[in-house]
Amino acid sequence: MNFKRGSSVAVAAVAALSLTLSACGSEESADASSSGAAGGSGVQCDGKLQLKGSGSTAQANAMTVFKNAFAQDCDGANVDYSGNGSGQGITEFTSGLTNFGGSDSPLNADQAKKAEEECGAPALNLPLVFGPIAVSYKLGDLSLNLSAPTLAKIFSGVVTKWNAPEIAAENPGTALPDTAITVVFRSDESGTTENFQKYLASAAPAEWSADKKGKSFKGGTGQGASGNAAVAATVNKAEGTITYAEWSFAKAQKLQVANIITSAGPEAVKLSNESVGKTIESAKFKTPGSKDLVIDTEGFYKPTATGAYPIVLATYEIVCSKYSDAEVGKGLKTFLKVAASKPAQDQLAGQGYAPIPESFRTTLNASIDSIQ
């Protein structure tokens, strides 16, 4: 990538946007390169170890984990990552302002073309962070099972009471209250909304039509709040509410999380690292055999494996397959290998993410190794 280090204006603009993730306060030069012994991840440190990235806020906490591991493993390493949204991250990457972008969705055709023009080679979509979306609610101490068709009816305002027949049928023997359901949705455009609506349209097409997709909520009911933290906090304040939010935010508010009835049936699936791990293991790619790892999420939403949790958001690192500066390519490979390593991924479990399983790591590392 033609990263514009020579332009003071560009550098200043990026600096103003960025939340600097520094490596133990290192004052190393931005042009420094390193080659050293492997650290805790077992990854050999090589190339330019001062990198810039921006994009998805969904992976911001994961990036903190990764940059710390990178700094511990590689002397003088530093990642400057700005969590400014997937769209902005792609724009900055395709404009040559960053070394990589973070996005809750893979590049579309137009973005891929711009990225290839900037890189001088095709870009790669590498899924590195997986965040389950929790269907969270507040309803006494009840543990509920819910299917995609029932969720679609709830989030479109068709089912309006917690003791509705659809909910009762999926929770036999549970004393459900005659309480009104209040849907809380994301009022801002978000990848969380986009992925949740893709799930409903795929797993419950009769109840949630294909045109009700996108980053804006299309359910037509409920009250809005901006951001994962806000929707989770809103639910925590009011009995009878329900929302969709990244798992970490549901955990932070100690919300109840629905078990999801899937196409694999018959038992409802509890959200856990294990159930999300099964989903990741079953991932199929849109272009089998390619180093570009765009996931066919239909397999997530309608699993065939029992015990696989279906509502999972994959965040991609958008990178060049070949960088004009070979040292940047080597450095980025080092960082991504550290981030994909078991020690780094295992730390994500406490952050509301799901660590990637070993079988998926093998595929991901092969793509990372192909970067030049």
Image (cartoon, helix red, strand yellow):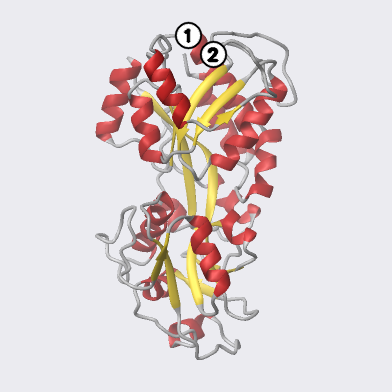
Where residue 342 sits, quadrant-wise, is: top right
Q: Amino acid at mark 2?
A: Lys
Q: Residue 92: where, in percent of width, then height?
A: 37, 28
Q: Is residue 88 above or below residue 42?
A: below
Q: Residue 372: where, in percent of width, then height?
A: 47, 13
Q: Amino acid at mark 1?
A: Ala
Q: Which mark is residue 17?
A: none
Where residue 237 sits, quadrant-wise, is: bottom right
Q: Is residue 18 visible?
A: yes
Residue that carries the numbered disc 2 in the rendered image: 330
Q: Residue 346: where, in percent of width, then height?
A: 69, 41
Where residue 216 sits, quadrant-wise, is: bottom left
- Nearest the viewer among 290 and 161 is 161
Residue that carries the numbered disc 1 in the rendered image: 326
- Nearest the viewer among 209 and 300 is 209
Between marks 2 and 1, how big is the CA–CA gap? 6 Å
Q: Residue 255: where, in percent of width, then height?
A: 61, 67
Q: Secondary structure at mark 1?
A: helix
Q: Is residue 65 above or below residue 10?
A: below
- Nearest the viewer among 198 and 370 is 198
Query: Which residue occupies 33% across, 68% down?
Result: 219
Q: Secondary structure at mark 2?
A: helix
- Disc 2 + disc 1, Cβ < 8 Å: yes
Q: Is residue 237 above or below residue 111?
A: below
Q: Is residue 304 visible?
A: no
Quadrant where the image shows the N terminus: top left
The answer to whether 68 appears left or right of 258 in the picture is right
Residue furthest right as drawn:
40
Query: Which residue occupies 36% across, 20% down?
Result: 96
